[in-house]
Amino acid sequence: MTHQFLFEIGCEEIPARFVRNAAKQFTEKTAKWFEEQRISFEEIQTFATPRRLTVAATGVAAKQNDQVELLRGPAAKIAKTEDGSWSKAALGFARKNGVDPISLELREEKGTEYIYAVKQVIGQGTQEVIAHSFSSVLESLTFPKTMRWEATKTKFIRPIRWLVCLFDSQVIPVSFAGVTADRITRGHRFLGNEIVISNADQYELVLKDQFVDVDMDERQNKIRHQLLELEKQNGWHIPIDLELLEEVTQLVEYPTVVSGQFETEYLELPKEVLITTMREHQRYFPVQDQSGTLLPYFVTIRNGDKNALRYVSQGNEKVLRARLADAQFFYLEDQKWSIENAKQKLEHIVYQEALGSMADRVERGRKLALALGELTGLSKEEREHLLRASSIAKFDQVTQMIGEFPELEGYMGREYALLQGENPKVAQALYEQVLPRHAEDELPTSRIGAILALADRFDSLVSGFGIGLSVSGSQDPYGFRKKAAVVVQLLLHHDTLNLSLTKCIDLALEVVEESGKLIHPKSEVKAELQEFFGLRLKALLTESAIRYDVIDAVLASEIDNLPFVLQKASVLMECVQHNHFKSETEGFIRVANLATKGNQHTVDRALLEASEEIKLYEAWSIASEEAKQAQNAMEVYKALSRMVPSIHSFFDHVMVMVDREEIKENRLALLKNIDQLVKSFAVFDSIVFEGE
């Protein structure tokens, strides 16, 4: 017969962004605990609301599984006396492990005999095991932020107020953080009461009666359904932002949608100002018509029932009206200043103490953007737009709107630039300089916008590393990892720019050095940044399911052209599936092993004697030219692989390390050139084959 187990942690409201991950962690650690304790179960369900984290296991065994332990004792020479009986050491080993000395036996391991005891471990009752050790699961839970609130100084996401622990109908008095588990839970903070759970299988139903939907997915679907109903009733379209949906799901225990409205005059504000005010600051869903035009309505989620919804709506309308009035005031006040006035204000905003003001940062970004633009073959019109956009970049930082709504950086720059008559392409670049803002965000569509975005990130990284700021372990206070990831993303997806990673770093270093802000030696900063970008590429390739050895092979080579790096990794992932790849890799490694012994790069054609080395020289010459003309990574690899038969033939028939110095050096030079060509693609001694 199997049983049901329920454990609920009741606490003060958990921040919405932590609820789902906390519930997932609780479930995973509970499952692991059952396995470690040898207690079988069928399934573990997860329940969570802002005030509770719960696991409910079904099909739980009544006791631990029995097991047989094989315990190794001392070596036979110590365990046996001269007359062949067990020594004191052997008898002590048996006594310590609770086994009869008669059951001891000798077994050989790596040429030495040891005594072993076979111990039958009878499983304890599940209730007893839970009572004694389930609190270890609670102690093992980790959170981004924790609190301490009682005498035992226990750390948890929020203060714990009650615990429920049931094995079917039996209470198991597990204690944690000064609270002992019972069968009493709490319903909705305002609509519910304390309630007794008589049996573990009644948990969901009991709490539903107390206005608590404990199933996260059910709660979210309930919100979706209510939003759809509201759309149908009013002919609206309510765009569902998934992050907002998840957040409001974890803010409430009993969701009810509430709609409200605001004055149409606020629709004159830019669309994103309205949406940001509603979504980011109030957790409201904006409302559109079927064509996507914003309507003067909003939808919010109430943590409660449908009682007195009109008053709830009026309260939310009042709050939003004040917010929108502020936004309208800021919007109108900002327009009293010209872009040039705003630029002057940047001189009074400190960017970083050692790096100067925001105006200094804009000037470095301008110089770097223009330098990058020179490398990308911009048209005359594009160069003019880049010059203007880079000169007024960040001017929106001093506006009152950005002071209140920092999420609108770039967007307000574009809006204000258009209002002041700037070229639309310049205005768009001002918006695109901040993109992408997060992993799922859009990328710059224009080359000018992409160059501004790159200049901004490269200046932050190079100037930051240049004064000694860096990333340490999980700590990244300056967001350098994110900035480097954005650079990689931009260089990969804007390959029409055809920018070299190393060249970008070099140009940024020159600009920072010229500004007098570079504290550490340029060579050290460059090496540190190249390693840093290598780690970002490694993470990207790992996420793309590239083998670790292929990643090592590719990253040990040239990483300047990021799209080509990804191509090379993809090509090698395809090649490792083929039988001939091992022979090719072995050929490249044979070359690499001897190439390091050479002292020169120039190959004298006249000193080539054996037919095999002449053929290898010709194969290298052809491969070099084909690699230069190749259109993609696969064509480069094919050019390299065509040298392999000549490489193996050369090593099978030609002695490299001969007594004649000029012949030896000439052959080593040939190998050094081949190795250099191969390693410009990948370092093949990183590749691991099965069985090695």
Image (cartoon, rainbow, N blue to C red):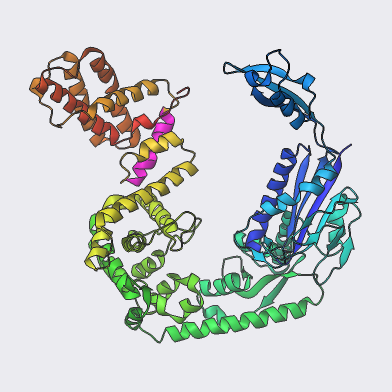
Q: Quadrant of the C terminus?
A: top left
Magenta span: predominant SS is helix
**Range of magenta residues:** 561-575
Going by the image, does 408 lie left or right of 344?
right
Q: Quadrant of residue 640?
A: top left
Going by the image, does 344 lie left or right of 4?
left
Residue most toward the front? 82
Residue most toward the left? 606
Seen from the viewer's position, the closer of residues 65 and 346 is 65
Q: Position of residue 370 (x, y in %)?
A: 25, 63
Q: Position of residue 522 (x, y in %)?
A: 25, 57
Query: Does the image show residue 385?
Result: no
Q: Position of residue 639 (x, y in %)?
A: 28, 28
- Is residue 557 within the magenta segment? no
Whether residue 316 is situated above or below residue 673 in the rendered picture: below
Q: Residue at x 71, y 24 (%)?
A: 90
Q: Residue at x 43, y 28 (%)?
A: 688
Going by the image, does 60 lie left or right of 379?
right
Going by the image, does 684 lie left or right of 621?
right
Seen from the viewer's position, the closer of residues 630 and 659 is 659
Seen from the viewer's position, the closer of residues 463 and 265 is 463
Q: Quadrant of the N terminus?
A: top right
- Is residue 569 within the magenta segment? yes
Q: Residue at x 57, y 74 (%)?
A: 277
Whether residue 65 is situated above or below residue 167 in the rendered picture: above
Q: Residue at x 30, y 73 (%)?
A: 360
Q: Position of residue 59 (x, y in %)?
A: 83, 40
